[in-house]
Image (spheres, rainbow, N blue to C red):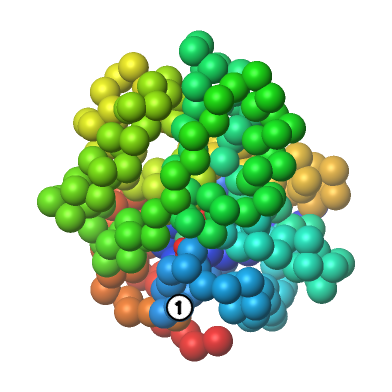
């Protein structure tokens, strides 16, 4: 039993899609979320920049005495999760990657798509994952860095989003995929828009549920789940402007939690 909070970090608001799953699957757990919105996007940064920025967020969360850290960002996970685990050996770290295994399993025509940032799309980490879990599938990976900055502004619908999505979805349509795995934690905010373009025949998969289950497994193994009787508390920090962050907290239907958001510099 351990009532310390779970720490969750992302380059921005994307990790809130994973936070949402964590708090619904683990309702007794408290959380501290940090978004580096000032430096977002990470998808177009180089390896050293991503590593140094991620390390600062890790240090911030550890200063708040978290018991486990969720790297709710594919761009960080594929770039440096092993280094972060070496740097912080005493803290369990759970990363995020697209659910390639599930996509390969449920695809009927064995043609799956992955939509990520360019950094994640180009990474050997993701390529290895595909080789391991989707041997019997044709996998089509497309990376874009245009969507994340718009989502950071609180834009999850509208002409700009639609134009970018239509361009990339056109490629997936031509490739005749029947399953699309989202390889960026920001993209579940666009699920409705993507469905509008791809239609109901293509199944969309995000990794939030799987990450939350993994968090639960690790806490159980370490015997550090929070006690049933505790009242959880949720705190959010951003290095960027408060207004867009609060706007996106409202998108996930947690209006009341906008009071728990503070701006910090790292
Ligand atoms: N949300 C992030 C991800 O899962 C990062 C987006 C970015 O900063 O480029 O990849």
**Between 2 and 20, which is closer to the camera in this rendering?**
20
Instruction: Identify the residue at the far left of this view.
Output: 159
Residue 208 pos. (x, y %):
53, 42
Disc 1 residue crowd, few under 14, some 14–19, many 20+, Cα 10 Å? some
Q: Residue at x 57, y 65 (%)?
A: 9
Front residue of 211 and 29: 211
Q: How far across and how far down the image is residue 266, in percent?
A: 55, 87
Is residue 220 left or right of 162 when viewed as pictured? Answer: right
Residue 234 visible? The answer is no
Residue 220 lies in what quarter of the image?
top right
In the displayed structure image, the side of residue 154 where residue 186 appears, left or right: right
| 177 lies above or below 213 | above
Quadrant in the picture for residue 46: bottom right
Label 1 sits on a secondary structure element that is helix
- Residue sticking out furthest to the bottom: 265
Query: In the image, residue 237 lies at what x, y percent?
Result: 47, 74
Q: Residue at the spot x=50%, y=27% of the render?
A: 112
In this rendering, does residue 209 appear at all? yes
Q: Is mark 1 within 8 Å of ligand 1?
A: no
* 193 relative to 206 in the view: left or right: left
Residue named by callout 1: 39
Residue ID at (52%, 72%): 45
**Residue at left offset 17%, top offset 55%:** 160
Labels in figure, total: 1
Q: Quadrant of residue 38?
A: bottom left
Which percent across, then down, holds residue 98? 57, 41
């Amino acid at each position: 039993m351990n009532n310390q909070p779970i720490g969750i970090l992302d380059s921005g608001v994307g990790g809130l899609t994973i936070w949402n799953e964590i708090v619904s699957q683990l309702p007794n757990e408290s959380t501290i979320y940090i978004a580096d919105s000032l430096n977002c996007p990470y998808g177009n940064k180089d390896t050293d920049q991503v590593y140094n920025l991620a390390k600062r967020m890790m240090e911030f969360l550890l200063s708040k005495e978290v018991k486990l850290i969720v790297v709710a960002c594919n761009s960080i996970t594929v770039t440096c999760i092993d280094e972060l685990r070496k740097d912080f050996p005493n803290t369990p770290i759970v990363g995020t990657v697209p659910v390639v295994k599930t996509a390969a399993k449920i695809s009927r025509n064995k043609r799956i798509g992955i939509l990520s940032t360019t950094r994640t799309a180009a990474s050997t980490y993701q390529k290895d994952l595909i080789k391991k879990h989707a041997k019997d599938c044709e996998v089509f990976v497309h990376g874009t860095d245009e969507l994340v900055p718009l989502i950071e502004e609180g834009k999850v619908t509208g002409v700009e989003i639609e134009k970018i999505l239509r361009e990339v979805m056109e490629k997936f349509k031509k490739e005749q995929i029947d399953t699309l795995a989202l390889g960026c934690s920001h993209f579940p905010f666009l699920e409705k828009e993507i469905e509008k373009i791809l239609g109901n025949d293509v199944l969309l998969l995000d990794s939030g549920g799987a990450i939350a289950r993994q968090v639960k497994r690790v806490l159980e193994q370490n015997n550090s789940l929070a006690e049933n009787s505790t009242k959880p508390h949720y705190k959010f920090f951003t290095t960027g402007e408060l207004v867009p962050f609060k706007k996106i907290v409202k998108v996930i239907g947690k209006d009341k939690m906008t009071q728990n958001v503070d701006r910090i510099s790292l």
